[in-house]
Image (tube, rainbow, N blue to C red):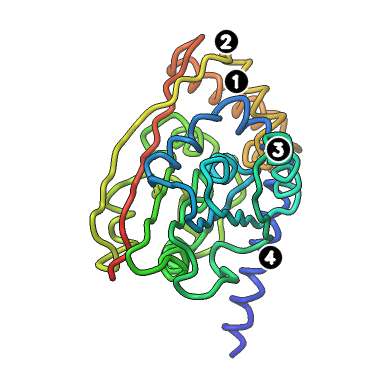
Amino acid sequence: MTEAIDAVEADRALKTKHRKMWALGDYPAVATQLIPDLGPDLVQACGIRSGQSVLDIAAGSGNAAIPAALAGASVVACDLTPELLEAGRKLAAERGAEVEWREADAEALPFPDGEFDTVMSCVGIMFAPHHQVSADELIRVCRPGGTIGLLNWTPEGFIGQMFATMKPFAPVPPPGAQPPPLWGREEHVRGLLGDRVTDVEAHRRTVRIGRFGKPADFREYFKANYGPTIATYRNVADDPGRVAALDADLDSLAERAGEGGMEWEYLVVTARRRD
């Protein structure tokens, strides 16, 4: 009994850390300035159209939820971090999109079984620590015959390599927490979904990022705006040598990716929940 209580408390503490981490910096700026095309790409891959009910899990500020609403769907966007939801409300209002915003944990969704025609996530659900639990939830709330759509960074791509670069400097994850970029491996996603889905399609694609003229521009942008990077730097803030080493490693990563233009790889998976 004590072990079970300890596990619940540890999970609650981890979710609190995640909530605070994604409130750091300005993730809505990252989503709108660097990767605005990813949400529409996922919406198109899912075939979202007018009249459908859609759930966007770990929606952030609505990179996919807002395009889905503009396509005519009835959309619920849920996320663990209230600050991202508030940013999403403002962005949706500016674009004339009607979206319902709900604070929710991807591993414990507050929705009935089979509630939605399409359940999707755009570089969001990958950050839930227990992959099978969140996969079970996204399947549960999708109606039989409905669509599941996922867009996630690959381990081999730039963002996956950025997480690998930051790992030695980041806080040690708790037991059972899995690396986010695993969601960018087709075989991993197929294993999570299992025989509960059919018609699985998976495609690797890239988005070109031309914002950063030199490696230091990339590094400073992420240090200022991207929650996981900010949290990693805070973890080593009392050790100037490790801060300098992290600076150098991120600069090296960006330099290898190509100054003036980067190609960030992601995986798009679509499937149909088995009837």
Instruction: Name the amino acid type tagged 4.
Output: Ala
Lower position in the chain sequence, tag 2 or tag 3: 3
Distance, label 3 to label 4, CA atoms, is: 30 Å
Distance, label 2 to label 3, CA atoms, is: 30 Å
Instruction: Name the amino acid type tagged 2.
Output: Lys
Q: Are marks 2 and 4 in contact (CB under 8 Å)?
A: no
* Residue 13 numbered mark, or none: 4
Q: Which quarter of the rendering shows the C terminus? A: bottom left
Distance, label 1 to label 2, CA atoms, is: 7 Å
Lower position in the chain sequence, tag 3 or tag 4: 4
Distance, label 4 to label 1, CA atoms, is: 31 Å
Instruction: Name the amino acid type tagged 3.
Output: Leu
Instruction: Name the amino acid type tagged 1.
Output: Phe
Q: Are marks 1 and 3 in contact (CB under 8 Å)?
A: no
Distance, label 2 to label 4, CA atoms, is: 38 Å
Which of 55 and 26 lies nearest the eye of the viewer?
Answer: 55
Q: Position of residue 183 (x, y in %)?
A: 40, 49
Which of 75 and 160 lies nearest the eye of the viewer?
Answer: 75
Residue 58 appears left or right of 203 = right
Lower position in the chain sequence, tag 1 or tag 3: 3
Q: Which residue is mark 1?
A: 218
Instruction: Tell us which disc is closer to us: 2 or 3.
Output: 3
* Residue 214 numbered mark, or none: 2
The image quarter in which residue 273 lies: bottom left
Which of 109 and 158 lies nearest the eye of the viewer?
Answer: 109
Q: Are marks 1 and 2 in contact (CB under 8 Å)?
A: yes
Q: Position of residue 145 (x, y in %)?
A: 32, 64
Question: For numbered disc 1, what is the local secondary structure?
Answer: helix
Q: Which residue is mark 3?
A: 91
Q: Residues within 10 Å of mark 4 (few under 14, many from 20)?
A: few
